[in-house]
Image (tube, grey):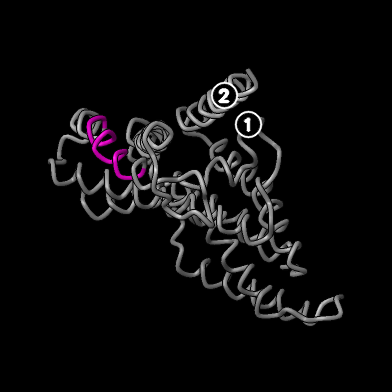
């Protein structure tokens, strides 16, 4: 009974999240980067929670200010070279000014690394959805659909017949059976939708995209799970009932959206 209630909670939460993301993608307006700002704010708070449990305190503005700017640079089509260098320099300056900080033991290298990685992981990667949206709404939703399908197939097959753990110390529920069987199951909708909306793509493209979505998404999931295991947390936060936090819910997409965008950029 409790398991059924938890599944219902997860399903409803996931359904509403999907509706919100699809709505903002569909209207293709300034609200899309604003949605990303909302994500970046809460995800950064979860990200800092990991570091704080290790007594490491990255500079808040060194992550948030560059993180807030990147979606708007992409939205307005501003060349990223010069602003990217300025943001890189800005993070270094803030980190230097903070050294050695208010704590007894300085963690300059860890704090600097955490700031750079945080901007890339929580802003640069997800903001590629804005660039992908420029190809059209139908194209922008594809990596979301493929990721959700792959995760669902991996979960169902892994729960049914999974016996061999993929990475037991990081994610005990993931199995090799679920991970591998999800590829052929995901290939079918990838083939159908690609040939509906990406008519220039052939079967080889479908295979590469299926493999990329599965591999990148799994790595993204395990990466975030590894962070949580490192600091002894089950969920990044409790924002979404049954799903944890923003990082828990979107960990696979943080890698799959950039992968899909880059594949289209170099292929089309």
Dot 1: few (<14), some (14–19), or many (≥20) neighbours within 10 Å?
some
Q: Residue at x 45, y 45 (%)?
A: 174
Question: Where, quadrant-wise, is the N terminus in this rendering?
Answer: top right
In the image, residue 182 lies in the stretch drawn in magenta: yes
Q: Does dot 2 land on a helix, a strand or a loop?
A: helix
Residue placed most toward the observer, 207 or 139: 207
Taking the image as shown, residue 200 lies to the left or right of residue 100, namely left
State if disc 1 and disc 2 touch (CB < 8 Å). yes
| Picture layout, residue 51 above or below residue 157 | below
Residue bearing mark 2: 7
| Picture layout, residue 262 above or below residue 148 | below
Taking the image as shown, residue 256 lies to the left or right of residue 184, namely right
Q: Residue at x 29, y 35 (%)?
A: 186
In the image, residue 156 lies in the stretch drawn in magenta: no
Residue placed most toward the observer, 229 or 60: 229
Q: Residue at x 45, y 68 (%)?
A: 81
The image's mark for residue 39 is none
Residue 139: percent from left, percent from top: 32, 35
The image's mark for residue 242 is 1
- Part of the protein shown in magenta: 179-189
């Amino acid at each position: 009974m409790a398991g059924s209630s938890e599944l219902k909670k997860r399903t409803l939460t996931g359904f509403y999240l999907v509706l919100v993301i699809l709505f903002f993608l569909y209207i293709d307006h300034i609200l899309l980067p604003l949605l990303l700002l909302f994500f970046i704010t809460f995800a950064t708070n979860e990200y800092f929670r990991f570091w704080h449990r290790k007594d490491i305190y990255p500079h808040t503005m060194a992550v948030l200010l560059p993180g807030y700017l990147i979606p708007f640079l992409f939205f307005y089509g501003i060349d990223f070279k010069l602003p990217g260098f300025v943001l890189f320099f800005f993070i270094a300056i803030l980190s230097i000014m903070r050294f050695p900080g208010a704590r007894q033991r300085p963690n300059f290298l860890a704090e600097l690394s955490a700031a750079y990685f945080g901007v890339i992981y929580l802003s640069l990667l997800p903001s590629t959805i804005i660039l992908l949206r420029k190809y059209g709404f139908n194209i922008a939703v594809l990596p979301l659909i493929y990721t959700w399908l792959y995760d669902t197939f991996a979960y169902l097959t892994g729960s049914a017949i999974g016996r061999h753990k993929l990475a037991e110390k990081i994610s005990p529920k993931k199995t090799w059976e679920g991970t591998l069987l999800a590829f052929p199951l995901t290939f079918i909708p990838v083939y159908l939708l690609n040939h509906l909306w990406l008519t220039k793509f052939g079967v080889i493209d479908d295979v590469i995209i299926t493999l990329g979505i599965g591999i990148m998404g799994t790595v993204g999931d395990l990466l975030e799970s590894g962070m949580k295991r490192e600091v002894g947390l089950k969920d990044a936060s409790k924002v979404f009932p049954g799903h944890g936090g923003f990082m828990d819910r979107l960990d696979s997409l943080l890698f799959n959206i950039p992968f899909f965008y880059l594949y289209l950029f170099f292929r089309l």
